Amino acid sequence: MKYRQVPFITLSEIGCRVWITLSGCNFNCKGCFSNARKPTGKPLTIEELVKLIKRSSQQYYGKLPEEIIITGGEPTLDKDYLLKLTSKLNFAHIILETNAHLLNKKYIKKLVKAGVKEFMVDLKALDDKKHKWYTGFSNKKILKNIKTIQENAKLVIKTLYIPGLVEENEIENIAKFIATINPKIEYRINDFKPMHGLSRNPTINEIEKAHSLAKKHLKNVIISRSCRRESKPLKKKTWITVFPDGTLKRRSTKDYKKRGDS
Ligand SMILES: C[S@@+](CC[C@H](N)C(=O)[O-])C[C@H]1O[C@@H](n2cnc3c(N)ncnc32)[C@H](O)[C@@H]1O
Ligand code: SF4
C-alpha cells in the first residue's frame, strides 16, 4: 500500500520524542481507548509522513527527534509501509508499540535490520480464553513472536490490569511466562482506563499486589501508565499533537484525564 491513514503525530515536552499514530487495527479489543483502532486521518505517503515528522521536530525541538515511537491502531497492519517508514527514520531510536500478532520471524529480522531498536509488546492476557474474549484472537502467535523478538532486539512487555479480567493471578502467570524466556525482560503493568462500559480503574493496592507477585519472577517490573515511558509518574505533562495539515493542539495530562485516556 502506498498510503496509510495518519490521524496525527505527537511530540512530548520532555525528551526529544515523536509518536507516530498509524490508524486501523487487526484486533477489536473490548476496552481499547484509541480512536485510531478504526481507519481515520489523512492518507499519507511515507515521504509525506517523514517530512511532517522532521518539520515538526525541527520546529519544536530545534533538531531531529532522538526517539520515535511507532504506534496505532496497529502499526504492523501494512508490513511493507512500516518497513520502508522505519528505514527512512533510522536516524532515531525507533520503538515499535504493537500487539505482535501480525509479526513473524522473517519480518521481525527485517524490521531490526531496517532500524527498529525496541519492541513494546502489549500482551493482553496469557490465558487464551481471556485473550480471545478481549481481542477476538488467540495469543499463540504473539507468545511465539515474543520469543523471537527477545533473540533479536530489546523487548519490553506491557499488560493492562483490567479488574474482573486481567488481575494479579493472570499478571503473575504472565511474569512466569516471561521469566522462562529471560527474567531480565522489562515488564510494565499499566492501569486500565474504563472504556465502552467495561470494568473500572484498578486501585493502587491491586496494582501493587500484582507488581509484588510479578517481582517474584522478574527482575525489572514497573508500574507505569500506558503511553508514558517515564519510570516516575509526572504531575503535569504537555504534548503537542500535530495534524497532517500542519495544525497543532497542545494537550496536558489534565485534558487526557478528562477524556478518560492517558
Ligand atoms: C492503543 S494501543 C496501540 C498499539 C497496539 N495496537 C497495542 O495494542 O499495543 C497502545 C497502548 O494503549 C493501551 N490501551 C488501550 N486501551 C486502553 C485503556 N482503556 N486503558 C489503558 N490503556 C489502554 C494498550 O494496552 C497499549 O499498550
Ligand atoms: S490492539 Fe491496540 S489499538 Fe488495536 S484494539 Fe487492541 S489496544 Fe486498541
Image (cartoon, rainbow, N blue to C red):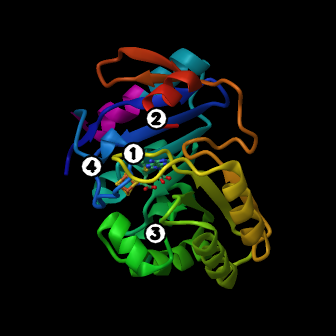
Dot 4: element: loop
Q: Is residue 60 magenta?
A: no
The disc label shown at residue 260, or none: 2
Q: In terms of depth relative to the viewer, which is nearer, 118 or 87? A: 118
| Cα distance in 3D space between marks 2 and 1 | 8 Å
Name the spot of residue 221 as percent of width and height, x first. 73, 62
Dot 3: element: helix
Nearest to the eye among marks 4 and 1: give it: 1
Q: In terms of depth relative to the viewer, which is nearer, 221 or 100? A: 221
The residue that mark 1 highlights is 195
Mark 2 CB lies closer than 8 A to ligand 1:
yes
The disc label shown at residue 24, or none: 4
Relative placement, left or right, of 187 versus 23 is right
The kind of secondary structure the magenta stretch mainly shows is helix
The answer to whether the residues at label 2 and label 1 have Cβ atoms under 8 Å apart is yes
Nearest to the eye among marks 3 and 2: give it: 2
| Cα distance in 3D space between marks 2 and 4 | 21 Å
Mark 2 vs 1, N-terminal side: 1
The residue that mark 3 highlights is 108
Identified at 56% across, 58% down, the residue is 161
